[in-house]
Image (cartoon, helix red, strand yellow):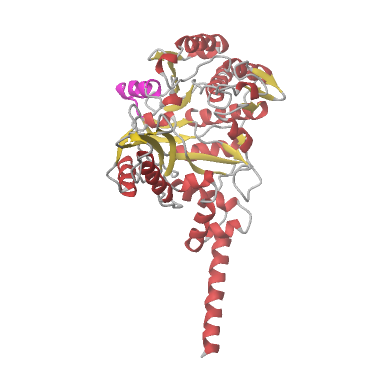
Amino acid sequence: MLKRLLLGAAAVLAVLVLVLAVKAALFTSVQLEPQPTEKIAIDADAAAARLAKATTFKTISHQIPWEFRGSEFTEFHAWLAEAFPQVHAALQREAVNDYSLLYTWKGSEPDLPPVLLLAHMDVVPVDAGSAEGWTHPPFDGVVADGRVWGRGSLDDKCSVIGLLETTEALLKSGWQPRRTLYFCFGHDEEIGGANGAGKIAALLAERGIKAWFSLDEGSAIVEGVLPGIDTPVALIATGEKGYVSLELTVMGEGGHSSQPPPQTSIGILAAGIARLEANQFPAAVAGPLAEMFDVVGREMDMPLRGLLANLWLFRPLLQSQLANSDTTNAALRTTTAVTIMEAGTKENVLPIKARAVVNFRILPGDTVAGVIEHTKRVLADDRITVNLVEGSEPDEPSPVSSTDSDSYRLLAQSVRNVHPDFPVGPGMTLGGTDTKHYYGVAENCYRFQPFVLDSADLATIHGTDESILIERYLDGIQLFAEILRNAAG
């Protein structure tokens, strides 16, 4: 009997090993074959200087409305007209809601659905006291050590100026689009985009425009971020997370601290927050993340490739490993982040009110209503009230755009033409972009900056020493040109 059991176990193990090996062997590349392409003529020094100059305009989006300085935007607009004369002679430019810009490059075949190229002109502030930590001042527009330094050099003036550089060069070469192209440059993306991209999208919808696809920031060609791959990987995000901030409030009796109740308002709130952090949303390798592993995993070295070829068996192991990193954990689930705590005025006075704000980034498949229901259920305490943060507009997670569409294949082919050695795959944007305003205007919405960025570059976005390598900026312009020519040529 024991011998038969051992032989049976060995046979099952042998079959399992065979299945794993076969599935790994069949897990082969699905990358598109590169096609020949031609570079556009770009003056490298002049292009770097123009991006540097763009960072000197303090087009800052402040959370407090009265700190907004519209003159920085109008001066930036005036400089753009001087810096890109061919663009401003050939394209129609409209100021939308005073400070956003809509450029129309009319195609020779107006019946073709147009393409929307999105970017934003605003930047985040530099934290007080952190300017001294910059290698070069954040608004001085310095070109040094092979880089352009300054706030906005990555987020997102490199896209605004890169698209205009591309267009200027294409116009000089005599190229004209068959399909109409719209460049939509918002002025308040960093605070939600309602008055910038929101107004542009509403204007396009009012004009009856239905675009073939839109392309915005939100992902990039990442280097050294994914394990098991030596080359940079281009991730074209097909969706982005939603957003909601909830205010948790407890009202107590107050009084003297010498006669405290069993739980103060702070204690009640703290216990509730502890329950929220201990009961996270479930993790899942699904949606764009699963698609990314299915495509990019085929380019990874063994044993990772074998693991990803057999997620039917190893999915729990993969999820547990991804959950160990804050970055990859965020791709697995709707995240819970306590960002504000307020209570108390004096050490011997019981606080009447305790307040906290919890920010959730919502995975496609979850909803704002589901987040609110989850929060109330986990708190399980009628003494804690739950409301939307006043003045904060929640955003549902995006629809997930198709990877089987002609528009996605066009983007992937363009990357492969310019960077034949770089794998391309789908991804997901963990933050928010202006794209959320265009869901009803474009058939598919993608998020992809055509620049190679490593983990050190990514850490400077919204942080200290934001900068971009000139070589990578110029390569991005070439990829912008390839995308435009393939989309509208």
Q: Is residue 427 left or right of residue 352?
A: right
In this rendering, the answer to whether 321 lies above or below 341 is: below
Q: Where does residue 19 sit, x and y in percent of width and height?
A: 53, 68
Residue at 44% x, 17% y is 101
Q: In which quadrant of the rendered view does residue 269 lie?
A: top left
Which residue is situated farthest in the left direction here?
382
| Number of marks present in the image shown | 0
Residue at 57% x, 53% y is 298
Q: In which quadrant of the rendered view does residue 446 lie?
A: top left
- Find out whether residue 205 is within the magenta segment: yes
Residue at 46% x, 31% y is 215
Which residue is situated farthest in the front direction here?
258
Q: Where does residue 302 sit, x and y in percent of width and height?
A: 63, 58
Which residue is situated farthest in the right direction here?
145
In this view, the residue in front, 368 or 78, is 368
- Find out whether residue 320 is within the magenta segment: no
Q: Is residue 279 left or right of residue 251?
A: right
In this rendering, the answer to whether 144 lies above or below 220 is: above
Q: Main secondary structure of the magenta part?
A: helix
In this view, the residue in front, 133 or 463, is 133
- Segment tinted magenta in the rendering: 195-210
Q: Where does residue 119 sit, x and y in percent of width and height?
A: 48, 25
Residue at 56% x, 52% y is 297
Q: Is residue 361 visible?
A: yes
Q: Is residue 226 left or right of residue 67?
A: right
